[in-house]
Amino acid sequence: MKVQITNFRDLGGIKNREGKQVKPRKLLRSGQLVDLDQETQTTLVDTFNLTRIIDFRRSFEIDESPDTPLENVEYVNLDLLGKMNAKSSSLADFAKLKSIEAVDQHMLGVYEDLILNPGAQEGFKEFLDYILENKDGATIFHCFAGKDRTGYASALLLLLLDVEKEAIYEDFLITNSERKQANDALLQQFREQGFDEAQLESLATALYVKEDYLDHAFHLIEKKFGTAEKYAAEYLNFDSEKLAELKAMYLVE
């Protein structure tokens, strides 16, 4: 079963605190779905029963690299950063920060905004509703690299499915090995454009995820809301009834 998508994985099989597992072939995460070969398209539709794509990217990202259309699969653009009125940051912008510390501070701010920004809260409210609505097939959600917008969305889902944090970190950090080849190619492109080593180091930091970023998100949820369930109920319109439905749909003994 070959899937030619960078940073692709099925959340199925991850265990929660009660020993239940996330159902396989239901919740998929990835980087952008660009130039998919026929084998990948067939695998997504026939093997995973994919029926919905949720694309978190900005319009300019989509214009540059549109997803491959898949027959009978609904495509939804849910522009999280647009809803947040976030400033568009290109890879070159990260290189201009010129220090790892500056990149880390920027990324911590991104994760904070993904939780506290009212536009982000509206976006994740819609995201969770889309996940609940897709009762028959699988949903794949993605951004450009599948690391931050997608990484936090995956962490949020797993938190609400009562998965241990250690398992959530494990899923989050898989990105670093899955993205290595693509990241190396991007860094080489910038090297050839004349970026110096300090700039390339900053860019390399921005291309990967760190445990500290997710730590910051988890601590913020606990500090501001107490639990993920309270955060979801109060700010994402995701009450106990919806939470029970999510668990019934996506967990198996």
Image (spheres, rainbow, N blue to C red):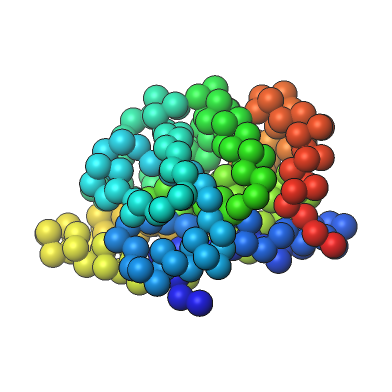
Position in image of residue 186 (x %, y %):
26, 62
Where is 1 relative to 123, above or below? below
Where is 65 relative to 184, above or below? above
Number of residue marks: 0
Where is 177 relative to 105, above or below? below
Position in image of residue 247 (x %, y %):
78, 47
Where is 213 relative to 228, above or below? below
Q: Residue furthest bottom?
A: 1
In the image, 202 versus 64, the foreground residue is 64
In the image, 96 versus 15, the foreground residue is 15
In the image, 155 versus 196, the foreground residue is 155
Which quadrant is the C terminus positioned in?
bottom right
Image quarter for residue 165?
Answer: bottom right
Q: Residue furthest front?
A: 72
Position in image of residue 127 (x %, y %):
57, 37
Decide if residue 165 is on the left or right side of residue 65. right
Decide if residue 42 is on the left or right side of residue 164. left
Task: Identify the residue at horizontal 63%, vertical 56% (top origin).
Answer: 26
Image quarter for residue 93?
Answer: top left
Task: Identify the residue at horizontal 48%, vertical 68% (top origin).
Answer: 43
- Residue 224 seen from this side: no
Task: Identify the residue at horizontal 67%, vertical 63% (top origin).
Answer: 24
- Residue 75 seen from this side: yes
Q: Residue furthest right?
A: 18
In the image, 105 versus 170, the foreground residue is 170
Position in image of residue 199 (x %, y %):
25, 55
Task: Identify the residue at horizontal 59%, vertical 54% (top origin).
Answer: 138
Image quarter for residue 36?
Answer: bottom left
